[in-house]
């Protein structure tokens, strides 16, 4: 663990304070909805716009005396600028942020149902309307070969699926990608977890079924993605 004095300017400080409030809200919602595992494994990384700096915001977990997050601000190269902790999560996703400026946030989280799917080493097709309407990505692939870093695996998958929203950490949790900031990412995680639960229940009833094209058109029409879906031949 690294302890460092504050070496960030006022603009970064203001951004970090807002991200800290959003993370505290997200952690509370995750706990109250049963989205996070009992151990409370949630690690957000939020890029500071226009910089090569990001803030890591880790849930302190159920055993902490202080339930509030303590942010660690670090450069993509691993220089800790403020906070008590390591830059590991920041450097782990640095290449993703550098090569994909549209990506604002990544969260590593252990949830009951997404975590359950991660144990299977199976690709999970996204078949829950509430989450599918928000993305043109159609599946969550498993990251099995851990000699490859999570960041490199995400970059590899983004080449084939530019709208990729998540990858499983095989035998662990899931890494979920955000393009609209921490709070919107947190809301999407709750929807992905709901979908994973419903699809797991459907397994006992014969398995979930692919969307009818008319349903995809309805879902993407609600979120404004239908025109782009048609342009790509997805509808």
Image: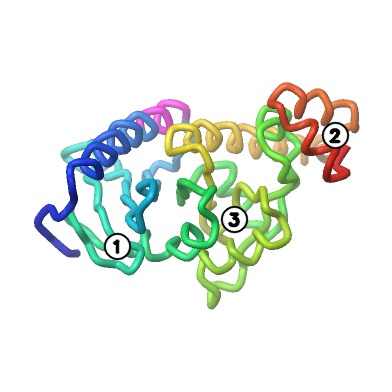
Determine the residue located farthest toward the bottom in the rendered image. 147
Mark 3 neighbour class, 10 Å CA radius: few under 14, some 14 to 19, many 20 or more: many
Residue 234 coordinates in the image, percent (x, y) = 85, 42
Q: Is residue 206 visible?
A: no
Q: Quadrant of residue 10?
A: top left
Q: Nearer the viewer, residue 146 or 197?
A: 146
Looking at the image, residue 91 lies above or below residue 211: below
The tag earlier along the polypeptide, 1 or 3, is: 1
From the image, give the main secondary structure of the stretch colored magenta: helix
Proximity of marks 1 and 2: CB atoms separated by less than 8 Å: no
Q: Quadrant of residue 90?
A: bottom left
The tag earlier along the polypeptide, 3 or 2, is: 3
* Residue corresponding to mark 1: 87
Q: Secondary structure at mark 2?
A: loop
* Residue corresponding to mark 2: 211
Q: Is residue 226 left or right of residue 68?
A: right
What sort of colour scheme is used for the picture?
A: rainbow
Q: Could you tell me how far apart the alpha carbons at marks 1 and 2 are, in whole angstroms?
A: 41 Å
Q: Is residue 187 visible?
A: yes
Q: Is residue 13 left or right of residue 196?
A: left
Mark 2 neighbour class, 10 Å CA radius: few under 14, some 14 to 19, many 20 or more: some
> Which residues are drawn in magenta?
28-33
Looking at the image, residue 7 lies above or below residue 92: above
Proximity of marks 1 and 3: CB atoms separated by less than 8 Å: no
At 51% from the left and 60% from the top, the residue drawn is 96
Looking at the image, residue 145 lies above or below residue 200: below
Q: Could you tell me how far apart the alpha carbons at marks 1 and 3 are, in whole angstroms?
A: 22 Å
Q: Could you tell me how far apart the alpha carbons at marks 3 and 2 are, in whole angstroms?
A: 22 Å
Quarter of the rendering occupied by the N terminus:
bottom left
């Amino acid at each position: 663990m690294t302890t460092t004095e504050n070496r960030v300017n006022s603009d970064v400080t203001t951004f970090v304070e807002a991200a800290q409030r959003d993370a505290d809200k997200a952690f509370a919602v995750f706990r109250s909805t049963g989205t996070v595992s009992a151990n409370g494994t949630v690690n957000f990384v939020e890029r500071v716009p226009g910089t090569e700096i990001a803030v890591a915001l880790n849930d302190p977990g159920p055993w902490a005396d202080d339930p509030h997050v303590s942010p660690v601000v670090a450069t993509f190269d691993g220089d800790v600028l403020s906070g008590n902790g390591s830059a590991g999560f920041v450097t782990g996703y640095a290449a993703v942020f550098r090569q994909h400026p549209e990506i604002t946030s990544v969260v590593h989280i252990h949830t009951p149902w997404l975590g359950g799917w991660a144990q299977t080493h199976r690709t999970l097709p996204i078949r829950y309307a509430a989450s599918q309407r928000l993305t043109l990505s159609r599946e969550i692939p498993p990251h099995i070969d851990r000699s490859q870093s999570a960041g490199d695996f995400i970059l590899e998958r983004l080449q084939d699926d530019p709208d990729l929203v998540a990858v499983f950490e095989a035998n662990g949790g899931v890494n979920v990608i955000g393009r609209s900031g921490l709070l919107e990412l947190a809301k999407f995680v709750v929807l992905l977890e709901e979908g994973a639960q419903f699809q797991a229940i459907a397994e006992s009833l014969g398995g979930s079924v692919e969307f009818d094209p008319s349903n995809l058109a309805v879902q993407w029409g609600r979120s404004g993605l239908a025109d782009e879906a048609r342009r790509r031949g997805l509808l």
